[in-house]
Image (cartoon, helix red, strand yellow):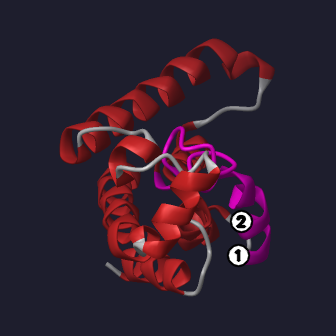
Amino acid sequence: MEKIEKALESFKEGYNCSQSVFSAYSDIFNVDRDTALLIASGLGGGIGRTGNVCGAVMGAVLILGLKYGFFKEDEIDIGKERVYSKVKEFLKRFEEENKSIICKELIGVDIGTEEGLKKAKEEKIFGNICPKFVESACKILEEMIK
């Protein structure tokens, strides 16, 4: 629960969904918070505020890469299978719980457009809806990285 609360607190401070999720868990893998915030900074708003894949999902995928990924040449084939299967499992679980992994579908507005972003800000969609997805991503992640 501590990591979930940490992610939600980061989100309340103004960090995007991806930064909030990734930075809450990055220390487990020896990535300091500042570096984690930098790495995940472009993934919020559905990747660069385009409304595509949810930032909370992207932050979790980065953590799955740290936990199950690979970097050694002799691990490429088995490493790809391992990390891709974990990412697929995460995506399936997130989508089952939230009906989508796509930001604009989750929040009901396309923030990739000027009008959509304006509406999201006016209706406080980010503060009212997005924490649910940050929490959901963290709960699934908690189970997957134990």
> Can residue 31 be seen in the rendering of this structure?
no
| Residues at marks 2 and 1, CA–CA distance in whole angstroms | 5 Å
Q: Is residue 23 magenta?
A: no
- The residue labelled by disc 2 is 36
Three-letter code, disc 1 = Arg
Judge from the rendering whether residue 131 lies leftward or rightward of residue 110; answer left or right: left
Q: Which mark is residue 144?
A: none
**CB under 8 Å between discs 2 and 1:** yes
Across and down, in percent, residue 133 comes to 35, 59
> Can residue 75 be seen in the rendering of this structure?
yes
Magenta stretch in the rendered image: 33-56
- Looking at the image, how many numbered discs can be counted on the residues? 2
Across and down, in percent, residue 100 comes to 31, 38
From the viewer's perspective, is residue 129 above or below residue 78?
below
Q: Secondary structure at mark 2?
A: helix
Q: Which mark is residue 33?
A: 1
Three-letter code, disc 2 = Ala
The furthest residue to the left: 97
Q: Quadrant of the C terminus?
A: bottom left
Query: Closer to the camera, 48 or 3?
Result: 48
From the viewer's perspective, is residue 129 above or below residue 11?
above
Across and down, in percent, residue 65 comes to 59, 41
Q: Quadrant of the N terminus?
A: bottom left
Judge from the rendering whether residue 27 lies leftward or rightward of residue 99; answer left or right: right
* Residue 8 sits in quarter: bottom left
Write the residue at 45% across / 46% down: 103
Q: Secondary structure at mark 1?
A: helix
Across and down, in percent, residue 34 comes to 77, 75
Write the residue at 40% across / 65% down: 130
Near mark 2 (Cα within 10 A), the count class, few <14, some 14-19 or many ≥20, is many
